[in-house]
Image (cartoon, helix red, strand yellow):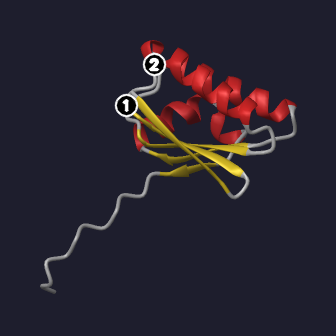
Amino acid sequence: MTFVHTVQAGRITVAVSGDLDLKTAAPLREALDGLINRYPDRQLVLDLAEVDFVDSSGLGVILGRYRKLSASGRSMALSGVKPPVWMVLELAGVLSIMPVSEYLPRNPVRDGRA
């Protein structure tokens, strides 16, 4: 798993790549907590466009950061969620507590023929 963050316009955006599972949950949690503490006036957006799998450990990271941010009056959103991950989030009730947007694949480059 890799993750890259950007900070702008009142938010921290963290693009995550790879599975979000027991093996990767702790490093992501530590990184997110560091960013949340470093930028106490920013909202958090997790870009999951490159994530194909989330297990209960991954859900724990997402929900734990949501609770932490909510307690300080800040918000969190998920973007780029692919269908398999969407189903997990839906079953866990995440869709009802925070904004979540679907993965929208980019249009293929056209070769100039109609």
* Residue at x 78% of width, y 33% of height: 69
Q: Secondary structure at mark 1?
A: loop
Name which of mark 1 and mark 2 comes first in the sequence.
1
* Mark number displayed over residue 18: 1
Question: Looking at the image, is 81 positioned above or below residue 106?
Answer: above
Q: Amino acid at mark 2?
A: Thr
Instruction: Quadrant for the N terminus, please.
Output: top left
Q: Dot 2: within a 10 Å radius of its alpha carbon, few (fewer than 14), some, or many (20 or more) residues?
A: some
Q: Residue furthest front?
A: 38
For the point 59% across and 22% down, the residue is 29
Q: In which quadrant will I find the C terminus?
A: bottom left
| Front residue of 94 and 43 | 43
Of 66 and 56, the residue lying toward us? 66
- Tell me which corner region of the image, top left, top right, bottom left or bottom right, holds residue 43: top right
* Picture residue at 75% right of the left edge, 45% below the top: 42
Answer whether residue 18 is visible to the viewer in this image.
Answer: yes
Query: Which residue bears the numbered disc 2?
Result: 24
